[in-house]
Amino acid sequence: MERMQRVVGQARAAFRSGRCRSLEFRLQQLKGLERMVREREQEILAAIHADLHKSGPNAFSHEILGLLGELALAMDKLKSWAAPQPVKKNLLTLRDEAYICPEPLGVVLIIGAWNYPFVLVMQPLVGAIAAGNAVVVKPSEISENTARLVADLLPQYLDPVTVRLLFAMQELYPVVTGGVPETTELLKERFDHILYTGNSAVGKIVMAAAAKHLTPVTLELGGKSPCYIDKDCDLTVACRRITWGKYMNCGQTCIAPDYILCDASIQSKVVENIKATLQEFYGEDVKSSPDYERIVNKRHFQRIVGLLKGQKIAHGGEADEATCFIAPTILTDVSPESKVMEEEIFGPVLPILTVKSVDEAIEFINCREKPLALYVFSNNKKLIRRVISETSSGGVTGNDVIMHFFLSTLPFGGVGNSGMGAYHGKHSFDTFSHRRACLIKDLKMESTNKLRYPPGSQKKVDWAKFFLLKRFNKSRAGVVIFAVLISVLLGIAAAVVAKNHQAVLKSKALLLVLAVQSLGGRRLW
């Protein structure tokens, strides 16, 4: 417990030193992170292979390529992301400065997941650094090789020791390794934001711990992501894309299609197309394919094998506990009440359930917890849009799977039981920033403020209604008259409130009439 207090306390002291606030410092850290990825690429790939039996090309594609893109985007856009954002003003604030200022939250905690052990720590870290925070990093202990490497590499490339020596070794980006006891102690500390990637059960524990400190959370959870295949569809293309998304990383992907819904008349064709694609991807002997990963450990292996009991296996089903190998498996005629439909599979097992129509598919989806992702395949774009409009999920991809994850302009996150909050691209920066409302006034024209000062009157209320509720059109004439109105009406209001001379009111009114006449009496609102 003392260790966690010390780690978080030092990170908070480092944040309060102010050294991570400047854009120059943030850019230096992002460049350091990029240099780490490029210089230590082979070590990173080796650690991922040791944890998940993932080949070099697959590990680079899944965990490094997107991260490099995220870093490039953050470094290119940081200045504009962090700049004050002017907002629209009303009549009463027309002369004032009004803007939103993104500011760092403070000390944030990122808890990674084991299925993509590098990118699911590093990608949110990019956003947290870009936003100017101190970050405590907790990689998953299940992917122990990658966790050790992250703990070893980050201090070498971020917030260098030469800088830390000047600040009494206060680390801005400490890495905490260990299992459940360490994470439990860490969650007792106060953070300014927590981002957790994992399952819903642990997500509830994280949220409960955060609630004790009123700490906001981003929870990237999971769920059973459905995939509906319409009869009006190119099954060859659809099944190839589904096969890729389902069996990549041995099915251990939070947004992998969890099960298929389709009409009974095309079920056998779906099975045959997926079988053909599996042979195309992995060859006759899947176990020897360098592109096919393994289940992360024996506990998860046994859990997945247990889901196959009593099921009709249309393809696959072979398993080897010694190597944590489970072959790509397809289940047909699956009952909605079966065990395999009760929990997220998170493995290479694909159940197929038959439905009679898209209406039945939509009802089936809506009767269950909101998933992290939803997929629908059809030549009919109206049908795809209907499924989107009548269901709810964290994200949707039509006529493909997983690809919405790779578009940084789209927020990635869940809804309901599949999570809350989002990140990726600027959404990461926003997640780890406080959007501070700023209004700067001057000390002039105090007479106009008498509208809001006591004593109250109906006349003051009427003027307040005008200033706060009136909407002007955006034509050229409207803009010009709008500007004239401001100067005139502020003067009139001030005169009325101050009970000024009638001559002042008449001169102001005359200016208003002349302005309207000069523009041909055009409509103002």
Image (tube, rainbow, N blue to C red):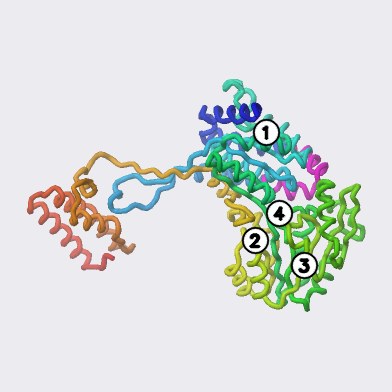
Q: Amino acid at mark 4?
A: Cys
Circle nearer the viewer, 4 or 2:
2
Tag 2: Cα neighbours inside 10 Å, few (<14), some, or many (≥20)?
some
Q: Is residue 213 left or right of residue 282?
A: left
- At mark 4, the secondary structure is loop
Q: Residue at x 73, y 53 (%)?
A: 253
Residue 26 visible in rendering: no
Labels 3 and 4: the sequence-earlier one: 3
Q: CA distance from mark 2 to mark 3?
A: 25 Å
Labels 3 and 1: the sequence-earlier one: 1
Residue 402, horizontal then vertical, whole percent: 69, 58
Foreground of the two, 355 or 381? 355
- At mark 1, the secondary structure is loop
User: For the N terminus, which image quadrant?
Assistant: top right
Labels 2 and 1: the sequence-earlier one: 1
Foreground of the two, 209 or 435? 209
Q: Which residues are magenta?
A: 40-67
Labels 4 and 1: the sequence-earlier one: 1
Residue 175 - label: 1
Labels 4 and 2: the sequence-earlier one: 4
Compared with 129, 250 (above or below) is below
Tag 3: Cα neighbours inside 10 Å, few (<14), some, or many (≥20)?
many
Q: CA distance from mark 3 to mark 4?
A: 19 Å
Q: CA distance from mark 4 to mark 2?
A: 15 Å
Residue 369 - label: 2
